Amino acid sequence: MTTPLLELSGLTKAYPGVVANSEVSFDIARGEVHALLGENGAGKSTLVKTIYGLVQPDAGHMRLDGKSFAPAEPRAARAAGVAMVFQHFSLFDAMSVAENVALGMENPPALNRLARQIREVSHSYGLPLDPDRIVGDLSAGERQRVEIVRCLLQEPRLLIMDEPTSVLTPQEVDILFETLRKLREEGVSILYISHKLEEIRTICDRATILRHGKVVGKCDPKTTAARDMAEQMVGATLATPSRSLGNTGEVVLELTGLSAPAPRAFGTALKDIDLTLRAGEVLGIGGVAGNGQDELAMALSGEMPVAQGMIRMKGREIGRDGVTARRCMGLLCAPEERMGHAAAPDMSLTENALLTAGPREDLVRHGFLRWGRAKSFAEKVIERFDVRTPGPGTAARALSGGNLQKFVIGREIMQRPEVLVVNQPTWGVDAAAAATIRQALLDLAEAGAAVIVISQDLDELMEISDRFAALNGGALSAPRPAEGLGIDEIGMMLGGAHDMTPAHGEG
């Protein structure tokens, strides 16, 4: 048999209070797309960081191409032929594509020579890039191309990809998969991490499943149902989100001619947005990253002033009200960026609960903080949303991304909002956690709240939305009933064909 490209044997890594990886063993063949699956906190990040030289294991060993492999730092891993595309882009908006690529190279050539290489490599792999463009002007999909091309210029033997399709349109996903197939044909091995299990079934040859830091299963994704893989990941039967269909109630939120300039360089201006939202309704808003999602959420939350137009809640104009006043009225928002925007990294979960729940949960009285109530509220969020943490005194930065996401969304839902705006509610969370969050949003709507879900996950939006609208370049299409909406129609709406949708009857 041919020697595997990478062999992991008994890898173990422990941190205070938790074993992240416990005797993990598997191999990756040459020219294989190998999926690494697991729920949040299963140990995937620690494992790939070990392969890439960011983490040193406590026990076990690795072999690359039949030889001992123990990179002390990422530079050593790259020199051995291991490259990694991270979930979060590490690019500078104000610099060109070529300048960003050069920053990720040990000994970059002159910029004009590098620009030629970028053009050649990007076109040969179906990911065309203009090396002279400023990164801040690129779409999310184009930014990912920069990260991938930067890796391909290293001529890797193993490419690690962490949630590579989280910011891509369906068309961009197809392009990426064509690139991965070409790399596979050239003998490059790919370690692929994603919570999108249908994608795993489409592109991956084998899968290794982690749970609580241990390998609990291996399978052929092409012959294994997505639900079966998800249930192996969590070790339990998954519930499908559902709610009883009821009539929507009165109009609770109205936007009329809402416009606002971009709040920062490379941001997106909002353009003449009209919207009506009723109690008990879930409105899904889709769009490729960078088309005004953050700006719309901030305009609704009160974080960003609007230049013109009106925002009414229950008939009252609230456009000039700040965040706290809107929260007191019952308009709550959970932003996309969980670390730094939704949560203060160095503050405890109790303190983070206090930051947004103070007015509605009576956590501040006569200017004094009620720490006992704040801790109790944080504990309730942790229990209901199964946040894996030692306790409410834990700092936000100590949680995995998925567990912090559960806390952030749960914190807002448990304040019983009348209008809830959530941006990317299940970004980076596992199948079980995503189902929990989606069910909580549906339960909230069933209880009479109006919910706006902004997401790049079209499957998610079609699963929970009553109506669907698309953001493109800061303009919002007229909402349409989600039931029966085809992928072609959705694609046209995402592409900006707003005039295809009749404006009447949206409320």
Image (spheres, rainbow, N blue to C red):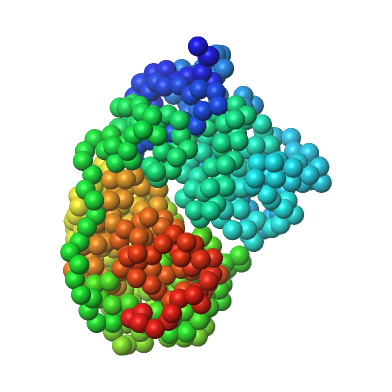
Residue at left 34%, top 31%?
210
Query: Which one is nearer the viewer's eye here, 115 or 490?
Result: 490
Query: Does residue 387 appear anywhere in the picture?
Result: yes
Q: Is residue 471 left or right of residue 364?
A: right
* Count of marks placed on residues: 0
In the picture shown, does residue 370 fall above or below 206? below
In the picture shown, does residue 240 fall above or below 232? below
Q: Quadrant of residue 282?
A: bottom left
Residue 381 percent across, percent down from the top left: 23, 55
Tell me the quadrant of the picture where the C terminus can be found. bottom left
Residue 154 percent across, percent down from the top left: 67, 33
Q: Residue furthest top?
A: 1
Residue at left 61%, top 66%?
265
In the picture shown, does residue 32 fall above or below 486? above
Residue at left 34%, top 50%?
404
Query: Which one is nearer the viewer's eye here, 452 or 318?
Result: 452
Residue 485 percent across, percent down from the top left: 38, 65
Residue 349 percent across, percent down from the top left: 30, 53
Query: Does residue 399 appear anywhere in the picture?
Result: no
Residue at left 41%, top 55%?
457
Query: Which one is nearer the viewer's eye here, 365 or 472?
Result: 472
Q: Is residue 181 left or right of residue 128?
A: left
